[in-house]
Image (cartoon, helix red, strand yellow):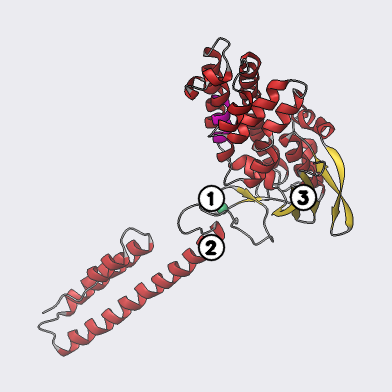
Amino acid sequence: MDFLNTVQFEGKREFIFVSGEKQIYPVGQIIFSILDTDWEPLIADANKTSARIMDLKGSFEIGKRMESPSESPYYLAAAFNNRFDSAFTSAPVLFYLFSSQMPFFFVRKYQGDSASKVFASFIKEYPVFDDTLRSFGSLKDESLSFLSVQYVISAAKALKRIHQFKSDIEYIIKETLDTDGPNSNMPIEKRYASLPPELRKKYERSDAAVSVKCVLDSDRPSMGYYSEDICALAFLEFEYMYINSLAVRKCDNCGRYFLPFSSLSRYCGRVAYDKNQKSCKDFAAMDKYSDKLSRNAAKKLYRQRANAYQMRCSRAPSAFPRSEYELWKENAKKLIEAFENGDITEEQFDKAIQIPGK
Ligand SMILES: [Zn+2]
C-alpha cells in the first residue's frame, strides 16, 4: 500500500508505480495531461450533483432509500464518482494518481466512522448495490448522506484547484520551458526568477505535500515521490524539468505542449482517439508524404497533357489552334495553384485539365 502511486524520474522518462506495476511515460506526463483536460464540465457536474444531493433531506433506512436510487444521496455520489473516473480514460496518469484514488483518500479521513465503510462499498459496487444493501440495508442513512455530499464537495474543490493550477502551470511553462516562448532568448536558469513572485510562492511550498519514498526497482533501490496532491506532484515534475533544462514545445499539429525527443521534433505523440488511432507524429509524416506525392503527381499529369496537346497542335493545327493551347496552359497553371492550396481535389484537377477534344 505504501508504494502505491509513486512517481520517479530518470532522464527524460518518468515512472509511475500503480499497485506495484511500473508505467513509463515521457517526463511531464502529469502536467501535459492536466493541460489536455477540460476541467470545467467536471466542475459543473460536481456542483450540480452536490446541490442535488443537498435537496434530498431526511433520515431513512438505507434499504428504504435505495428503493428509488435516483433519490439516494449515496447512489448519486457513486454515479458521480463513476463519471469522474471515466473522464480520464484517455489520461491514465490522472486516473491512477487522481480520480481512482479520490474515494480512498477521502474515506481515510473518516476512518473511525462506520458510514465511511458503507460509502466505500457503494462506490466499489456501483452501478449495482445488492451486496452493500444486504449488509447495511437496515442502517439509518443520516451520516452516510452527509458523507456523500462531503465527498462530492471535496471533489469539486480538488477540481477547482487543478483548474486553477492548469492556467498557472501553462503560464509558468510558457515563460520558462517553452522553446518558442517569450523568454527563449534568456538562459533557462534565469527564466524562473522572472516569474511574478506571488505565482512562485503559490507552488514552491507544495513539496511539503510530497514525501520521498524508496522504491525497489529490479533490486536497485531508487527514490520516488508520493503525494495525495496531484498538483504537488505536477509541480515536482515541473521542477525536475526545469532543473534538468528539459524544454518543451507546442506540437505543430495539435498545438499542445510536449517534450520533444530532439530539437528537430515538431510533433507530439498524442493519439487521436478515432478509428485510425494515429498520433500527431504519424499524421504529420503521412501528410507530408501524400502532399508531396500528389503535388508531384499533379505536375506530372499536367506535363503529360501539355506534351500531348502540343503534339496535336503541330499535327492538326486547324483542329487544335495554338492560341487555344496557350489559353489552356494558362488555365492549367491556375488550376495547379488551386490544387496546391487545397481549393480543388485531385479528381477535379484531373477533369479540369482535360485536353479540349475533338
Ligand atoms: Zn500533437
Secondary-structure class at tag 2: helix
User: Which label's residue is closer to the chain start, 1 or 3?
Assistant: 3
- The kind of residue tagged 2 is Asp
Q: Residue at 68% across / 21% down in the picture?
A: 115
Q: Are marks 1 and 3 in contact (CB under 8 Å)?
A: no
Residue 81 screen position, x and y as percent:
59, 32
Q: Which mark is residue 254?
A: 1
Secondary-structure class at tag 1: loop
User: Is 307 within the magenta?
Assistant: no
Question: What residue sits right under mark 3 in the picture?
Answer: 20
Secondary-structure class at tag 3: loop
How far apart in space, not on screen, are marks 2 and 3 (Cα)?
32 Å
- The image quarter in which residue 135 lies: top right
Mark closer to the observer (2, 3): 3
- The kind of residue tagged 3 is Gly
Q: Residue at 77% across / 31% down in the picture?
A: 203
CB of mark 1 near ligand 1 (< 8 Å): yes
